[in-house]
Image: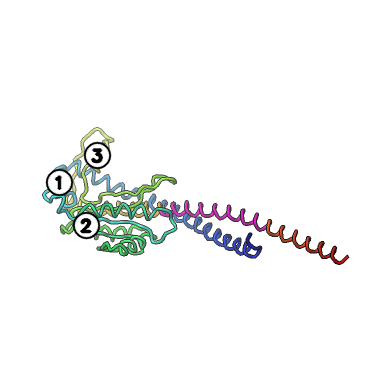
Amino acid sequence: MASIKEIRTHIKSVEQTLKITNAMFLISSSNLQKARKQLTDVEPYFQKISTTISDILHHSPEINHVFFDKRTHIPPEKRKIGYIVITGDKGLAGAYNHNILKLAEEKLSQSAHTSLYVVGQVGRSYFMEHGIPIDMEFLYTAQNPNVGRARDMSETVLELFRTGQLDEVYVIFTRMVNSFQMEPTIHKLLPLDPDAFPQEEEITSYNRDVAYVPSVKAVMDRLVPGYVKGDLFGALVQSYCSEQNARMTAMKSSSDNARAMLQTLNLSYNRARQTAITQEITEVVGGAQAAQ
């Protein structure tokens, strides 16, 4: 049996760890609520962009825009594919980072012409350690997803796609289904698919005559970057929410284990004290009897 001093030291150590895990749980909970509110606040704006694009496609089905060009003339084995991989900047979040990195490696191995764009310090460190070349890093984005950073990322990939340096662009992120389920997800950013913009049912019974000024192409040139920006922002916030939720779960589990360990240690401590007291009483009684 460990000594009383050793058990007391162990108890203090576990108590300090419990304070840290509790604090991290509360911080992650606050960050999760903040990120959800941020996404909810901007969703109507990006939803309106999506609706407008759908309306344009419905009224101008003959439109031939660069961001909808699937480049079918390029065979699959020669297509240049870009992957934006969103990870966290730190660990202590269960299998959150591991699952997304596993999916990213699987997709990167399926094509000979791939470009890798990394969000998050964990992903950067992992790919560097495994000798996987990184084409671009978006630093300090995972812990602070905002529309400005999503815009910078979208402008980069849009330019690469427009100039033919990339034929397809995907974002690999973790989608938060609910508080208990998170899914590593791959989502196609470019080229856009007209089928992803279904036409909403007309509220009125008459047909509208719509004119786009100065032209349909010019309007799409402004709308599509906004749509891609919203798509990326949603992926960033979904990943951030998933990370915070995974960290909350991990910290709650750690806190529960720490409390269970404290109960066991306190029981051992009390037993050790009782044993020490009993031994002292026995020694005193034995000494008194010897003195008689």
Magenta stretch, overall SS: helix
> Dot 2: few (<14), some (14–19), or many (≥20) neighbours within 10 Å?
some
| Quadrant of the rendering where the N terminus is positioned | bottom right
The answer to whether residue 257 is magenta is yes
Report the amino acid beneath label 2.
Thr
Residue 138: assigned label: none
Q: Of label 1 and label 3, which has the lower sequence position?
A: 1
Residue 27: tell me if it is visible.
yes
Mark 2, secondary structure of its residue = strand
Q: Which residue is mark 3?
A: 199
Report the amino acid beneath label 3.
Gln
Q: Position of residue 19 (x, y in %)?
A: 55, 60
The colour mode here is rainbow
Residue 63: assigned label: 1
Residue at figure coordinates x 27%, y 36% from the top left: 201
Residue 214: tell me if it is visible.
no
The answer to whether residue 12 is magenta is no
Residue range in magenta is 243-270
Mark 1, secondary structure of its residue = loop
Q: Which residue is mark 2?
A: 114
Discs 1, 2 touching: Cβ within 8 Å:
no
Instruction: Name the mark nearer the viewer: 1 or 2.
Output: 2
- Determine the image quadrant of residue 281: bottom right
